[in-house]
Image: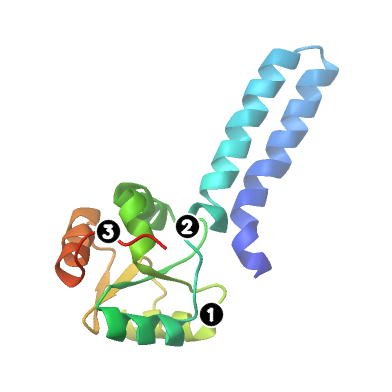
Amino acid sequence: MTRAWIPPMLFMVPGSLVATMLVVRGVTGTALALLAVFVLLAGVHSPLAFPRSTGAVEAQRRSAADGRPVVYWRAGCKYCLRLRIRLGREGRRLHWVDIWRDPAGAAAVRAADDGNETVPTVVVAGRPHVNPDPGWVREQLARTSGPSQHR
């Protein structure tokens, strides 16, 4: 679980140190602006930018019941972030599995990509697709479920 927070901490710690040095030098406005940028970067690279993750077994069970794709991801992955941002609110309808929190999810990704943990890996109807185009994922979601159903 702590592994998922390493990328955001890599933004927060240096950003805080640089902002502190700027405050000491009397450049408070610049320090606050820089700190805001680092906080934003930390936020989008954190698990908080993604819908709540479930375990791989639970996600597969839910996908079998409702037909929605399963997305295997990890914090700090720029391709996962790109997928999440491009899906927008529709992304909440997918089943998200954080491979750093779920060993079964990491194993499923390795099985799909010759032993590599390449994410995002999206499973649609039992078939894995490594780093698919976000538009394609949106199309698959539209095919597998009707109008938006927000929880």
Residue 13 pos. (x, y %) = 72, 43
Marks 3/2: CA distance? 18 Å
Comparing marks 3 and 1, which lies closer to the viewer?
A: 3
In this figure, which colouring scheme has been used for the structure? rainbow
- Amino acid beneath label 1: Asp
Categorize mark 3 by other alpha carbons within 10 Å: few (<14), some (14-19), many (20+): few
Q: Secondary structure at mark 1?
A: loop
What residue sits 55% from the left and 40% below the top? 41
Write down the residue under mark 1: 102
Q: Position of residue 128 (x, y in %)?
A: 26, 78
Lower sequence index among marks 3 and 1:
1
Horizontally, is 24 left or right of 68 in the view?
right
Q: Nearer the viewer, residue 39 or 63?
A: 63
Image quadrant in which you'd find residue 112: bottom left
Q: Which mark is residue 136?
A: none
Disc 3 marks which amino acid?
Answer: Ser
The amino acid type found where label 2 is placed reads Phe
Which mark is on residue 50?
2
Residue 69 % position (x, y): 28, 73
In the image, residue 15 sits, relative to residue 119, either above or below, namely: above
| Closer to us: 53 or 12 | 53
Please name the residue shown 19% across and 65% down the image. Answer: 146
Q: Quadrant of residue 39?
A: top right
Give the camera-side residue of 138 and 111: 138
Q: Position of residue 100 (x, y in %)?
A: 55, 72
Which residue is labeled 3 in the image?
Answer: 148
Earlier-in-chain disc, 3 versus 2:
2
